[in-house]
Amino acid sequence: MTTENSVRPDRVRLKTYALLPSALRIPALVIAGSLVMVVCAKTTVPFWPVPMTMQVFGTFLLAGLVGGRLAASMIALYLLEGASGLPVFASAAHGGVGFLSLIGPTGGYLLGFVVAAFVSGEWIRRAGLGGRVASVLPMLAGLLLIYGFGWLWLSQFVGWAKALTVGVLPFLPGDLLKICLAAAAVMVLSRVAKRA
């Protein structure tokens, strides 16, 4: 029997994961997912007003691979790590660590990652879209959620219009590309898992 929080057989399998006691498998997977987000946050392209990172890619990669609840847990742990002072956020090199990062100008986007992972991941899981091109649609919906949360929060700092012109529109082409890359990666990894 498969529960919503368990990893289905058609998900990506890791030999080391299978060797862990069953009680430790989900926590280990959540920690691994949070580390994926750390790597994605540290993979940056210089951009204004904030660096362009791969966090959108990581969000939808996790959502497509493990479903909404587990992906949201992974990203929530990542945010908790950052809130506790660990230098996991993209802005950490510029002093962006701790709880203040979550309530600063980009805090809405960070919260949006959790909501988007849950909504798009559950949509993908329930519709059986994992590993299929059609998973792009739930990912696009998730991107709208990220932008919605980010824009609303950023607008409290810079105003509605400027939040749109500096916090949404410049990032749209790159984030659409990241969604395509995430969907492609999920397709490849799902096929590899089925052959394993």
Image (spheres, rainbow, N blue to C red):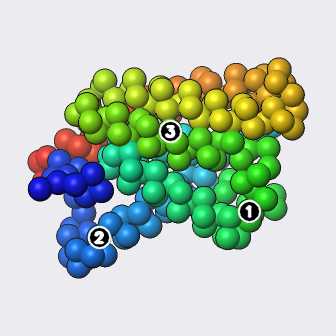
Say what amino acid the circle numbered 1 marks. Phe
Residue nearest the observer in this picture, 1 or 20: 1
Determine which of the numbered discs, if any, sits on residue 116 in the image: 3
Which quadrant of the structure image shows residue 148? top right
Q: Earlier in the sequence, mark 2 or mark 3?
A: 2
SS at badge 2: helix
Distance of mark 2 from mark 3, alpha carbons?
24 Å
| Residue 115 appearing in the image | yes
Q: Which residue is mark 2?
A: 25
Q: Which residue is mark 1?
A: 99
- Coordinates of residue 154 in the picture (x, y in percent): 78, 36
Residue nearest the observer in this picture, 189 or 164: 164
Residue nearest the observer in this picture, 2 or 196: 2
SS at badge 3: helix
- Coordinates of residue 27 in the picture (x, y in percent): 37, 70
Distance of mark 1 from mark 2, alpha carbons?
28 Å
Q: Is residue 18 above or below residue 156?
A: below
Q: Earlier in the sequence, mark 1 or mark 2?
A: 2
Q: Is residue 87 above or below residue 48?
A: below
**In the visual, does 9 lie left or right of 82?**
left
- Coordinates of residue 1 in the picture (x, y in percent): 11, 56
Distance of mark 1 from mark 3, alpha carbons?
21 Å
Label 2, residues with CA under 10 Å away: few <14, some 14-19, many ≥20: some
